[in-house]
Image (cartoon, rainbow, N blue to C red):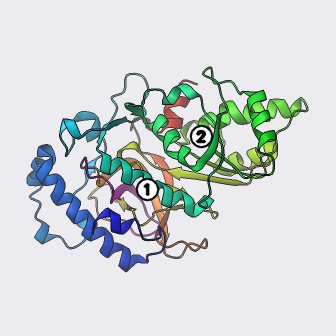
Amino acid sequence: MNFDEIIQISPYSLARAEKEKLLTERLFELTDLHRERCAEYGKMLAGRDYRADQVSSYLELPFLPVRLFKELSLKSISEEEIVKTMTSSGTTGQAVSRIYLDKTTSSNQQKAMVKIVSAFTGSSRMPMIILDCPSVVKNRQMFSARGAGILGFSIFGSKKIYALDDDMKLDVEGVRAFLEKNQGKRIFLFGFTFMIWQHFYKELLRLKNEGIAFDLSNGVLIHGGGWKKLIRESVSPEEFHDRLNEVCGLEHIHDYYGMVEQTGCIYMQCECGHLHASIFSDVIMRRPFDFSECEIGEKGIIQVVSTIPESYPGHSLLTEDEGIVLGEDDCPCGRKGKYFKIIGRLKNAELRGCSDTYAAKF
């Protein structure tokens, strides 16, 4: 099954049996494609003695440690076909992942993201406040994960403003004028968790204490990039939501889980506080001692699979995060598929999320 067929399906409409059939067919195709086109990947499969006729489900396919993209230049296309190189976030001195995209993979990433996010926000584009600074997206050829996130979500904005200047200071007058101009309209906000807390929430709180308030009760916020710094400051997701609601009236807030190695197939948080896998992807929790699949409710290392990557072998990856699958096909929000929560980074794993790597400065 090719991606053009998959993209026609509603992202949270397939129950377990149907989704497993779809993912198995597509991921087997991608495994064969990358084995033929990426020499390093082919050698790794040979080292595992992988044979397609000996596996029956995508759950049994080999996976690559996500860290390999920091160590090797893994791509299944020629240099001439590369249209974009994406890099992961990292603190100073860290190696970064490099992900090579051709036109097809880049386009399919965007198509999947539109389908996923629209299932939460609706299909209409909205006036957008980007809770970051404009300099992040200036280098269009070498996208950082942070810049890629901003540009990816910008497709949902009809008119856009950056809330912060390049010194990460809130543009109070600019935001005020934007809200006045778009009064009565639904406002879309996007940013990374720690930056929102550090540079947006704290400044709004200071202004409110001085009698200056912004009304964002008609807004919807999507944020991501890691919680490590905020959790250390004893700021839970619940408190993050409550404080933003208190300071500016924001009620509709969705976290998401994603990574540059599988851009496009993000895992959005529903109204019940659960992260969801769409039909474009899946999560599998693995036991650390033998990498067998965990039961529902059992903590494990997160494996992610994606139907999107054709330009690099990133369709089955073992992350350095821990999580728990909470259930499948029975979330109270009504969306089909697995729903889960993130526990955090594995001990001694490097910081990765845009929010967490930025927060390391603080």
Q: Secondary structure at mark 2?
A: strand
| Residue located 24% across and 34% down the image | 71
The amino acid type found where label 2 is placed reads: Gly
Please state the horizontal and vertical placement of residue 306, each as a whole percent of the image: 34, 58
The crowding category of the residue bearing disc 2, from other C-alpha atoms within 10 Å (few below 14, some 14 to 19, many at least 20), is many
**In the picture shown, does residue 232 fall above or below 18?**
above
The disc placed on residue 348 is none
Please state the horizontal and vertical placement of residue 185, each as a whole percent of the image: 75, 51
Alpha carbon distance from label 1 to label 2: 20 Å
Q: Is residue 360 visible?
A: no
The amino acid type found where label 1 is placed reads: Lys
Please state the horizontal and vertical placement of residue 323, each as a whole percent of the image: 45, 56
Q: Is residue 336 visible?
A: yes
Q: Relative to the observer, which residue lies in front, 337 or 81? A: 81
Q: Secondary structure at mark 1?
A: helix
Q: Relative to the observer, which residue lies in front, 209 or 320? A: 209
Magenta residues, start to end: 294-312
**Which corner quadrant of the image does residue 94 belong to?**
top left
Query: Residue lying farthest top?
Result: 167
| Residue located 17% across and 40% down the image | 78
The disc placed on residue 191 is 2
Q: Nearer the viewer, mark 1 or mark 2?
A: 1
Would residue 123 be found to the left or right of residue 80 on screen?
A: right
Residue 311: in magenta span: yes
Quickly name the residue at label 1: 111
